Image (cartoon, rainbow, N blue to C red):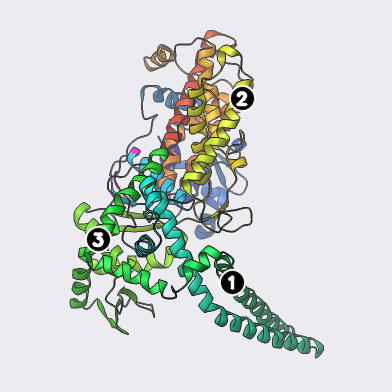
Amino acid sequence: MNLNKVIAERFADALTAIGVDPEPYLGLVRPSQDPKFGDFQANFAMPLGKRLGKAPRDVAADIIAHFTYDDLLETPEIAGPGFINLRVKTSILAELAQAEAVDERLGVEKVAKPRKIVLDYSAPNVAKPLHVGHIRSTMIGNTLSRILRFLGHNVISDNHLGDWGTQFGMIFYGYRNFLDRQAYETSPIDELARLYRLTRQLVDYFAAKKSLGELSEQIEVARNALDVQKKVCADAKAAGAAKDVLKKANKELDRLIKALESATEKYDEAKGKVDEVEKNPMLVELAKGRDDIGQAVLQETSKLHHGDPENRALWRQIIPQCQKEVDKIYSRLDVKFDVALGESFYNDRLGPLVERLKERGIARETEGAIGIFLPGRDVPMLIQKSDAGYLYATTDLATLEYRRDTYHPDAILYVVDFRQSNHFEQLFEAAKFLGMENVELCHVKFGTVLGDDGKPFRTRIGDAVGLKSLLDEAESRAYAVVEANNASRSPEDRFSEDEMHETARRIGIGALVYADLSQNRDSDYVFSFDKMLAMNGNTATYMQYAYARARSIFAKGDVDVEALRREFAERKRNLTLEQPEERALAFELVEFQSALENVVRDYRPNFLTAYLYELANKYSSFFEKCPVLKASDDDVRANRLFLCDLTARTIAQGLTLLGIQTVERM
């Protein structure tokens, strides 16, 4: 049961009874921030007081007079200027918690009206190894898929693989010019990754070398403009200019300082790419005579797209190797997809789509290219280049059409980083021309994983950190912790080597996944293994420890947990909540459904991690203040064991929905 929702619905009836449209005010019914004010608080009497011309406390009293509560709540209290404080009856909390004993879903009801939702996430370029940036899309999408399904929605998870772009042109060029045949036969994916990196490095080198002159001029122009503006500011200050004049002059000075910094940063980045090649004799030798490598890569890509037999054959040879490597990472993360249709799947649909859009007057020629002119935008959304090539926008429109015609969805969610925001704004506007006005199209955007320097997390050579190496490192660090703890155990209680590795795998990968999902998805966050693996704070390790501690009490007390559950399910025992810590824990347990519904309201997994953290904290307080195995009598002992079991089950279910496994011992 979602108590917050039930209470809000009852307030809707009360507000309607006093002649107020309830819809704008129901969001003001929220859980209390401080338990001393009750469990929930309704804060709409103040804004209604202004609207109705009455004292907010009087408005609150009128609302309560029409509010049905006595079967669920204690008598509401009016506090301060008109806050309505609400406390759920303790007997109701006990009843709701006990009802969960017979429910495999822990009291979480499925939605009355399931939606069909296409969920697009992960979407790597398969020609390259997955990197740290893919963790966010993959795990946010995976969690949303699990939660939406758990709530009863019909989800189609679609991994829109990048298997057709310029990265293959780079690999083809590298394959034909730099291939180490023996290395390819020994480990094809490693050799393909090397070829991609090498070709990209040379492409970037020539582009950077060509740009140095222009960037140097930009720095000189910016520096001269800055010198002039400094003099303007100094003269204005000396002349006693008005404050607004000085403010405007200083604002322009700040802008020019930033412009110089930006130009210098771009120059330094380009110079770094040039130096990286020119200080390496092997790369200097490989670069000789390859000034046109950038154009050659584009030609290789174009040949693939236009059906060149050799490139198509090479592509068919490479794709299974790439897919196999990607699937290994997904297996380690326990991530699965219903479909994995790459860009190549839609290639034959692009030409006909462009023609249809032109025939309907939706798209037209612009400077030799074809674009869709969207309302309120000066720049068209290009769907065909002047050389007849297609763009990401073309493929995404074709994908939308396919999903509409194949799945007939109510919603399509794209879990893609924030840098693509403008693309999706245009795509969703263009989708209206395809007859998708009634389909929810949502860009579930997210921020960047940062290093300690506040910049995108990268290796020392500037590449994004590989996801495989990240998972390996997480497991390795977790193993060191498990091994150290194991050494302190008594001989008969120690883990076997297999148990240590399995426990380390679950802890390490769980820590990595939870650290990402616990962030507000809109925000960037700084990557830190030490914080991820901490035994306290909002981490997976803390959650796994809370679960293991709750479970271990049954082994320690030689308690048959299945028999205990049956006693409460069959009403041979009835749960009572005598101590404040028991009540607080029970309240948190029955809030599980509310937490899941909060996640899907705006597609934010951190609402679930926040709930689990609060639940673990409530359990810790309960465990410290309420003896379980040494309880005062058998009934109290059974009640507390029941709460321990329900806590463990809820944490386990919550972690499962996040894609994280539990451990029985830490």
| Distance CA(mark 3)–CA(mark 1) | 36 Å
Rendered-image quadrant of the N terminus: top left
Give whichever of discs 1 and 2 has the lower sequence position: 1
User: What is the crowding at mark 1: few (fewer than 14 residues within 10 Å), some, or many (at least 20)?
Assistant: some
Which quarter of the figure has residue 6?
top left
Mark 2: amino acid: Asn
533 part of magenta stretch = no
**Labels 3, 2: front one:** 3
Looking at the rendered image, the quarter that the C terminus falls into is top right
Left or right relative to 419: residue 579: right
- Asked whether residue 20 is in view, the answer is no
The residue indicated by pointer 2 is 485
Percent x, y of residue 624: 63, 23
Disc 1 marks a residue whose amino acid type is Lys
Secondary structure at numbered mark 3: helix
22 to 151, vertically: above or below: below
| Labelled disc at residue 312 | 3
**Picture coordinates of residue 36, whole percent (x, y):** 62, 36
The residue lying at 59 percent from left, 26 percent from top is 483
Measuring 40% from the left and 25% from the top, which residue is drawn there? Answer: 100
Q: Earlier in the sequence, mark 3 or mark 2?
A: 3
Q: Are marks 1 and 2 in contact (CB under 8 Å)?
A: no
* Residue range (magenta): 150-162
